[in-house]
């Protein structure tokens, strides 16, 4: 392991698209969605633990989730958890980690990863990761990892390569296209899903932030002497109260001219929705995804069923539905209306407050 290699895990999301299983008090990165006995966050840590020393992990999360992080990752110290007072999208999250790390180790190379992805071909992915760590050590580049698309997906961003080299300069980024454009991208062969996984030297991402997000650079560099001290918490509270919410893709990656991509097929999914969980999960003879026991279905097809432990369900006559039950909330909706979950949450919150959110 290289002492200058770090892994930054972004773990601050609320996971609303997995409601009611995922709640504000315990979002999906802390849940064992697949029944493996490990949360998404734990799986993410173990994915990189062969490459990165335990002392070099940094988790950026909401201040309310600090204890959850330490519970799921007992190998790390409290100082390795950076707490955002409020979510401001991925650019401020990455700024916090990068400027903090710049003070600690100016020679650092950073892997930046979401906390809620699934990767089935772990060894292939590890080889790619180590290849890219070597590449960025010798080049002033911002690396992103692309995924070979398997379908015209409208829920992902796309990256267009400029050539057929294994590591290629990025021609352009396209955010979440409509279905017609997504079909064109897949047929073209030059476009790949944007995984949201990045690798770069800390000084290269800081230089890019200074150039393309100068207001963020000004804020986060102004407290460079406060990182790792008792002054950090108050300084970060002030910065997050005034900094603009923006994604790293829009704020930096779409504008920089030194962005490269390494594409591959290693069984990736961001498992961002009930629909993506359905696609990844094992199905019964009627294409239902349901618990191994306790769920009895009759005339029911193409459904996904999630139940609390030890709860029994009898479901008859449903086709293409999501049935998600928890101790205090039951949601039943057509799979094709999954995008309305945000509307359901807003309605519940308006009528009953935050208790069930």
Image (cartoon, rainbow, N blue to C red):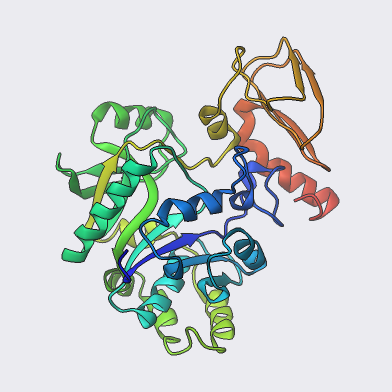
Which residue corresponds to the image point at 43% horizontal and 32% vertical from the top-left?
Answer: 153
Q: Quadrant of the N terminus?
A: bottom left
Res 258 seen here = no
- For the residue pair 198 and 310, the one nearer the viewer reads as 310
Q: State the image quarter where residue 109 is shown.
A: bottom left
**32 versus 104 height, above or below:** above
Residue 8 location, x and y as percent? 43, 63
- For the residue pair 290 and 260, the one nearer the viewer reads as 290
**240 versus 144 height, above or below:** below
Res 41 seen here = yes
Q: State the image quarter where residue 71 is shown.
A: bottom right
- For the residue pair 187 and 39, the one nearer the viewer reads as 39
Which residue corresponds to the image point at 66% horizontal and 66% vertical from the top-left?
Answer: 67
Q: Is residue 101 left or right of residue 282?
A: left
Residue 97 location, x and y as percent? 44, 71
Which residue corresponds to the image point at 40% horizontal and 65% vertical from the top-left?
Answer: 53
- For the residue pair 76 and 149, the one nearer the viewer reads as 76
Residue 75 location, x and y as percent? 53, 65
Residue 339 location, x and y as percent? 60, 36
Labels in figure, total: 0
Q: Is residue 163 left or right of residue 242?
A: left
Which residue corresponds to the image point at 55% horizontal and 73% vertical from the top-left?
Answer: 77
**78 versus 233 height, above or below:** above
């Amino acid at each position: 392991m290289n002492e200058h290699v770090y892994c930054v895990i972004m773990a601050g999301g609320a996971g609303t698209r997995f409601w009611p299983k995922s709640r504000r008090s315990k979002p999906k990165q802390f849940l064992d969605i697949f029944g493996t006995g490990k949360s998404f966050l734990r799986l993410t840590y173990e994915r990189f633990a062969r490459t990165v020393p335990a002392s070099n992990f940094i988790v950026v999360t909401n201040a309310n989730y600090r204890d959850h992080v330490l519970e799921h990752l007992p190998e790390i110290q409290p100082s390795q958890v950076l707490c955002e007072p409020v979510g401001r999208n991925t650019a401020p999250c990455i700024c916090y980690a990068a400027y903090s790390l710049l003070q600690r180790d100016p020679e650092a190379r950073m892997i930046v990863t979401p906390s809620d992805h699934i990767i089935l071909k772990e060894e292939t992915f590890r080889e790619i990761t180590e290849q890219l760590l070597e590449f960025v050590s010798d080049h002033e580049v911002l690396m992103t990892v692309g995924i070979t698309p398997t379908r015209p997906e409208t829920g992902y961003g796309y990256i267009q390569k400029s050539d057929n080299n294994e590591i290629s300069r990025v021609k352009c980024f396209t955010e979440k296209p409509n279905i017609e454009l997504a079909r064109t991208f897949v047929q073209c062969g030059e476009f790949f899903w944007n995984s949201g996984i990045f690798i770069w030297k800390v000084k290269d991402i800081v230089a890019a932030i200074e150039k393309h997000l100068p207001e963020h650079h000004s804020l986060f560099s102004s407290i460079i002497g406060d990182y790792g001290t008792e002054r950090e918490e108050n300084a970060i509270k002030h910065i997050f109260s005034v900094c603009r919410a923006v994604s790293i893709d829009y704020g930096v990656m779409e504008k920089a001219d030194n962005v490269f991509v390494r594409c591959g097929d290693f069984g990736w999914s961001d498992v961002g929705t009930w629909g993506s969980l359905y696609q990844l999960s094992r199905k019964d003879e009627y294409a239902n995804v349901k618990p191994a026991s306790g769920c009895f279905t009759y005339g029911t097809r193409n459904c996904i069923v999630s139940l609390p432990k030890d709860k029994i369900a009898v479901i008859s006559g449903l086709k293409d539905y999501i049935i998600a039950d928890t101790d205090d909330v039951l949601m039943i909706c057509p799979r094709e209306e999954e995008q309305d979950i945000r509307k359901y949450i807003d309605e519940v919150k308006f009528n009953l407050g935050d208790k069930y959110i």
